[in-house]
Image (spheres, coloured by chain):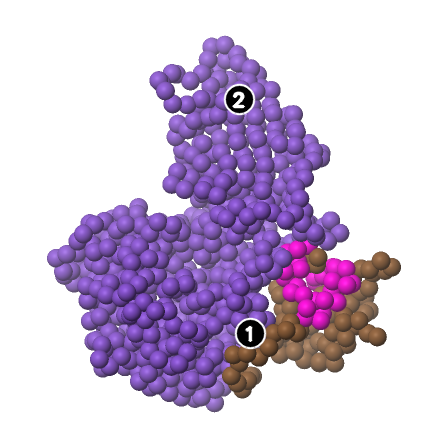
Chain colours: A brown, B purple
Amino acid sequence: MASPTEEFFGELGRREYIPQLGKTTGTVRIELVDDECTRHWYFRINQGKLLVSRENLEADSVVRSRQDVFDHVAAGEMNMMAAVLRGEVSVEGQLPLLTLFERVIPEPPSSGCRGRVSDQGVGS
Amino acid sequence: MNDTLVNILSGNTFVVSDDRGDIEASPAAPTGLFAFDTRFVSTWVLSIDGQRLSPLSLDDVEYYMTRFFLVVGGGGVYVNPKVSVIRGRAVAEGFREQLAILNHDDSPVDLTVRVEVGSDFADLFEVKDALAKKGTYYSRIENDCLVIGYLRDTFQRETVISASTPAHLDGRGFTFAVHIEPKQEWTTGLSVVPTLLGPFGRKLTLTAEAGPIRTSEEMQANLQDLIGQSPRLECDWDALKHTYRRSLVDLAALRFSAPAFAGQNLPAAGLPWFMSLFGRDSIITSLQALPFQPGLAATTLRELASRQGSRRDDFRDEDPGRIMHEMRFGETAAFEERPHSPYFGSADATPLFIVLLDEYERWTGDTDLVCAYEPEARAALHWIDAYGDLMGNGYLSYRTRNEQTGLTNQCWKDSWDSISYRDGRLPGFPRATCELQGYAYDAKLRGARLARLVWHDPALADRLESEAADLKRRFNRDFWIEDREYYALGLDADGGQIDALSSNIGHLLWSGIVDEDKADAVVGHLFDPVMFTGWGIRTLSADEKRYNPLGYHVGTVWPFDNSFIAWGLRRYGYEREAARIAAGILTAATYFGGRLPEAFAGYERSRTKYPAQYPTACSPQAWSTGAPLLFLRTMLGLETADDSLVVRPALPRHIGHIELLDIPGRWGRADAYGRGKIEMPITQ
């Protein structure tokens, strides 16, 4: 069975364009460590166009954590910024890229739709 | 806190100590070295031969450095001291201290100099509550440095202290054996560096990579540059010149280096406890400072856009498109005991983000930025109706989804009792306060302007304009209290009017949502003695049940609130009234050395003669620092029209002649002149 991280990147890889990242360009390397090895994921964004890869790419910023920690982040169960403050995830390099990377992380499963009235966009 | 001192640099690092330079933190004396919302030093005590020092004088050099002049022992009959101490301190990455001990005697002295060091690593939120910590403390000596640390699970913070001269180190400080020849001195340098540790023992980075730590000389040059780039004020009233300069220096001290954008600054909310990124505070201050330092607005817009909400998260009150309220980096945010990572519980920051974006473009002509942040601006406009209208009645309202640690009132009056009926009852939730509707209305009209002009989307512009017109029509029907002739403070969950008379109605003038035929009545209420103290307009009418002249949002006078009301009065053509408020608040500033506090008491001016500061008000506080700037704008009547600056002065007579030179904007630089012609009532 695929891990939450694999599911997350799998799903992300099927999205070719992310409007919320329309003016962002850069590459984030995600290094995930468990007892046996380190796995690398690459998340490259070019003016909103997205590439998810496991091939070695030159990165502008690096996210490091234990594999099980990132699984929680990828499932929306753990807030990445709080995890960074706790010292469970480290971030290096270009920080704007990372705050934008946060935009594609799913929302917490428990957060419902209370209070939401309509979802008609002002979308571009 | 009266005799403590504050130094600040690089936004969120600051030192609070007593007047000897010592730090002995307690709940009553919240002193220490703070960085990233954590206290990294809570004990820092200098002694010589076991004796504490006494202050002679203090040289508050700049906001980032201080010098203490000290002697051994204290009090009693005056004896010429044989030894004195000069303790210089500059805030840097942590702080650096230069100790000089001077022997004034004819014979040599041998002294034992001790610096006692400790830290409780308290979260800023815990400082005043002295909460028990859940982690463990440690200390070690490593490479001639004393390392003190705190560990809770994976959360690890350390303070590294080193000295430039040989010392005996133990787990609790430094001891120097000092021999000083007659008329000679001994010096040492101490360096204190806060460190955040991440996974795998790596140093944690939380902000954009900054340049090298600046020296005091570079800081001084930077401050001079900043003042030099701001417009120059010449006027007959010296006190105003002083207040203006104080505002510029304080604004510099309040600069916070943008976490996501290296080398760019935006205003933090206040010293010392609010040196953090706040959506509302940064936007309000940037609006006030726009004609003086437009760069602050640009950074505020970029930073807030990059942290705009992207998902539903009940704990953080986050929604897609929502602009954040407050960001914190401490232990309680890390362990999600508090939601500030970041927290989004503000109902006004999102429409005000659009207001600032448009106002920024009007002044600077920087359409590139408006273009670049089109998706964020659209998402913010979308949020107003899709997520902000909790009652489905077409009004922006709030109710926290985090009942434990979320904010009850998500408007600028955010204390628990700020929103009440006349009889003192508190309404249920959601609450739709009136000024939120004004901000939403203004945001839609300004969004429409940007849509037409910059985003080339006339359909969106038409839609926003039609929504704004509809909102204004409904608002003037539903919020207007017919028999009392003012706007209700808000609507409650049943759509009923929250009928207290408040300063919020002044903000409605600023937003332009007030029907022309209702403006006279609104202005009449604002200057009724139940609202106007002689200094300024109270947050809540003295006739209301919850009124208290010392109540944080229920009777005090807030300079920032008054500055926006004055702006609104000018918008509706009430020049005399705008000048009256400006004169009152700017005169009040002279009682505070030109530095307006966050709030002062709502007593009648005729009763106290001087403005009484609200007991625990933050100072300097960003939007109070910005208030004199906005008053200068409203008094001179500065507005933009196409590519030029419009000046329509309306000044109180006693201000005399005034010149504001080199005002930056889309016109390059321009000057504004005015002469005081408006007579103030005799009480002023």
Position above or below: A27 against A88: below
Q: Tell which of B339 and B20 is nearer to you.
A: B339
Q: Which residue is mark 1?
A: B319
Residue B538 vs residue A105: left or right? left
Q: Amino acid at mark 2?
A: Gly
Measuring 48% from the left and 25% from the top, which residue is drawn there?
Answer: B52
Q: Which residue is mark 2?
A: B50
Chain where mark 1 sits: B
Q: Tell which of B641 and B320 is nearer to you.
A: B320
Residue closest to the far top: B107
In the picture, which quadrant includes the N terminus of chain B? top left
Q: Which residues are magenta?
A: A60-87
Residue B422 vs residue B206: left or right? left
> Badge 1 local density, few (<14 within 10 Å), some, or many (20+)?
many
Q: How many marks?
A: 2
Q: Position of residue B478 (x, y in %)?
A: 33, 83
